[in-house]
Image (cartoon, rainbow, N blue to C red):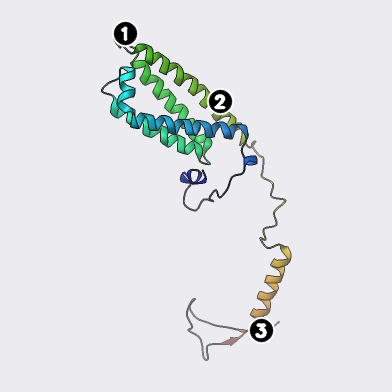
Amino acid sequence: MTFISNIAKWEGDPKVLRSGPSSLGGSDRMARALGWLSIGLGMTELLATQRVTRALGMEGRESLLRFYGAREIASGILTLSTEQQLGLWSRVAGDGIDIATLLTAMRRDNPKRDNVGLALATVLGVTLLDLIGAEAVKARHRRDIGQRRSYGDRSGFPGGVKAARGAARGFGDSASSGSTRIGKPGTSASTNDGMIPSRRS
């Protein structure tokens, strides 16, 4: 699961190492379920393309259906990633395209018109779920205008303040007890004997 969560991340973004049950709210679980549904539907459209087109009386549109399948899989992966809201809204947009496509198959001369009607009702129901999920995720992760994150429980020192003070003290001691080399960074070039005694205050 963490692998899928990291797919939609840019290079340099923090990676998801582990996600505990307590970190998932109801909206997150709903988004996850819709993400898997999207991937399952996309795989069906890719692997059983001709069966689907025959069942809907849409022969000749196999390439379009495969494109829709790839879109569903991409939306599902995005929904399962940390970009849940973007993934869910992409699903809503895809649902609109699916509805428009199915409406073109509701012609009177289509012998599979009843199947198209059933598919249309199903897509409308899923669209409602996608809208609810997108709004729920938006509300859960929303920050009001002007609201700032609180980092009062963070010190900025991974090893603690005492360890940081000790490290700084040790750095100062080593710098004052030695000498300084002059030259280009990463080289041993120097002036005279290569060493200049450091000033002591």
- Disc 2/disc 1 C-alpha distance (Å): 33 Å
Q: Is residue 67 among the parts visible in the rendering?
A: no
| First of labels 2, 1 by sequence position | 1
Q: Kindly identify the amino acid type of the residue bearing the numbered disc 2.
A: Ile
Q: Amino acid at mark 3?
A: Ser
Q: Quadrant of the C terminus?
A: bottom right
Q: CA distance from mark 1 to mark 3?
A: 93 Å
Is residue 54 placed above or below 136 in the rendered structure? above
Q: Nearer the viewer, residue 181 or 23?
A: 23
Identify the residue at image location x=33%, y=13%. Answer: 112
> Marks 2 and 3, how far apart in space?
67 Å
Q: Which residue is mark 3?
A: 177
Q: Earlier in the sequence, mark 2 or mark 3?
A: 2
- The residue singled out by tag 2 in the image is 132
Amino acid marked by disc 1: Arg
Q: Please tell me whether mark 2 sits on a helix, a strand or a loop.
A: helix
Q: Position of residue 95 (x, y in %)?
A: 44, 25
User: Which residue position is annotated with label 1?
Assistant: 108
